[in-house]
Image (spheres, helix red, strand yellow):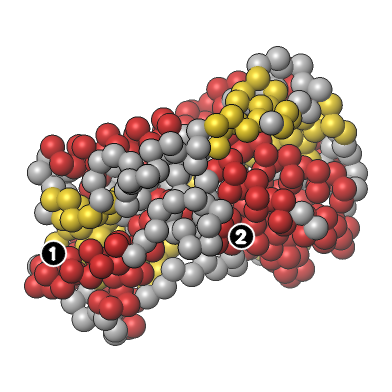
Amino acid sequence: MKTIDKIYINGAFVTPHGQEMFELINPATNEVIGQVRLGDETDAQLAIASAKEAFKTFSLSTKETRMSYLQKLYDALKKRVDDLTAATIQEYGAPISRAKASTEMALDAFLYAQEVLKDFEFERKAGRSQVRMEPLGVVGIITPWNANANYLCGKLATAISAGCTVVMKPSEMSALQTAVVLEAFHEAGLPAGIFNVVNGLGNVVGAELTRHPDVAKISFTGSTAVGKTIARGAVDTMKRVTLELGGKSPNIILDDADLSKAIPMAVAAGFMNNGQACIAGTRLLVPETRLGEVKALLKEAVANVKVGDPADATTAIGPMVSVKQYERVQSYIQSGIEQGAEVLAGGPGHPEGLEGGNFVKPTVFTNVTPDMKIAREEIFGPVISVLTYKTEEEAVAMANDTTYGLAAYVSSTNEERAKKVAAQIVAGRVMVNSLQHDPMAPFGGFKQSGIGREYGIFGLEEYVEPKAIIRD
């Protein structure tokens, strides 16, 4: 069992002022695999002070200096990819294929940031004025348990590109991943104070970052409920915020789609990352005239989805991250049954032989109506709801009938038609005949899926503020 009893402030590993210990659980077995000592408000304040001091000089650094730091972080983390992948599997339960992909995304964030930074114009002309894009200041970074290392790296890379210093509050449930990443970051040898890390609870360390007057911005990825709390707290000091929140992503299968390709892709979209993904395509909208074909293909596709040991290369779905999350997903499955939806595949309870962990049967509901809880609320588990439509216009209206607007999917053999439909969907990203990620394209949500964007030039501009210098 591993004990993590240090946080990182001003370039050094230090013992937290906080005393509380938090147990780390392997979700595949529910066995305790470690513990982490949590920081408190005092630790957050010390970290903020360190970042504030470092900002004085780092904010004046050149592009070349920042790019060299990004490369050093990449080089150091590259040596630890196997360790990071193993930690992701052990404490989160991500299938090994997903864990490897997540690690690569975390690593590559530093390369893509260099590419963006290379051509970014920090000085521009507007009318008679010179406009300077200046770094905001100290940034509070708060990351989620479903993609902790990925967001630690991505958000830090963007902040460094802008010339900001940071205090990071990772998910306390992801302390093993954080430890690997942090050891690599320390080895990179950046000047003290540019990045600081405080393990701690959101309502303690996260709250201090949100209210502290020396923090200029919060970049948060997580639930919509917590995002609203941060937004309310941040306004008192007029902090800038980037909030990447929840989703209830629609997946429109148009009537001309090749179902032999579209349905397996729809299952992958709905069950990605064990279903614990904000962009998961959990609302499957299909033409009423093709429902029979869709149901048959869904049953076949789900039957081929293996649930089990996340370290097994053949596993597609691992456990839910915690007992609490398992019970949450079960409550939604039960709700679907009680409200009259038909269980096409899966259902309540553990898969046979996997009762010791937080495993959920991959579940597909049909006969779902738009008013049902399973069609409206984010479940965050491997549960897909199938809804039918009569016309393309009805499909678009149904897709947009949600408080969320993070991602969406469209399948069609006519790409121009699919693009036309995609243009009508109110979502930050729409994937056409694809599940691909583009690290240079903006990512973020409409409506209650968030504020602001990450990735590429769009993400970098969230960390700078334009200053106009007007001359005669």
Q: Where does label 1 land, which residue? A: 389
Q: Quadrant of the N terminus?
A: top right
Q: Tell whether 53 sits left or right of 128.
A: right
Task: Classify 10 Å Cα crowding around label 1: few (below 14), some (14-19), many (20 and above).
Answer: many
Q: Residue at horizontal 56%, vertical 53%?
A: 311
Task: Classify 10 Å Cα crowding around label 2: few (below 14), some (14-19), many (20 and above).
Answer: some
Residue 166 seen in render: no
Q: Tell whether 196 sits left or right of 319.
A: right
Between circles 2 and 1, the one closer to the viewer is: 2
**Which residue is more in the foreground, 19 or 363?**
363
Q: Tell whether 191 sits left or right of 145.
A: right
- Find residue 316 and report its horizontal and vertical position in percent: 44, 59
- SS class, disc 2: helix
- The amino acid type found where label 2 is placed reads Lys
Q: Residue at horizontal 52%, vertical 66%?
A: 437
Q: Residue at horizontal 80%, vertical 58%?
A: 79
Q: Where does label 2 land, which residue? A: 100
- SS class, disc 1: strand
- The amino acid type found where label 1 is placed reads Tyr
**Which residue is more in the foreground, 270 or 129?**
270
Q: Tell whether 83 sits left or right of 248.
A: right
**Res. 390 image quadrant:** bottom left
- Find residue 256 and report its horizontal and vertical position in percent: 21, 81
Q: Residue furthest front?
A: 353
State if disc 1 and disc 2 touch (CB < 8 Å): no
In this rendering, the answer to whether 448 lies above or below 459 is above
Q: Quadrant of the C terminus?
A: bottom right
Q: Earlier in the sequence, mark 2 or mark 1?
A: 2
Q: CA distance from mark 2 to mark 1?
A: 38 Å
Residue 229 seen in render: yes
**Which residue is more in the foreground, 82 or 193?**
82
Give the numbered dot on residue 329.
none
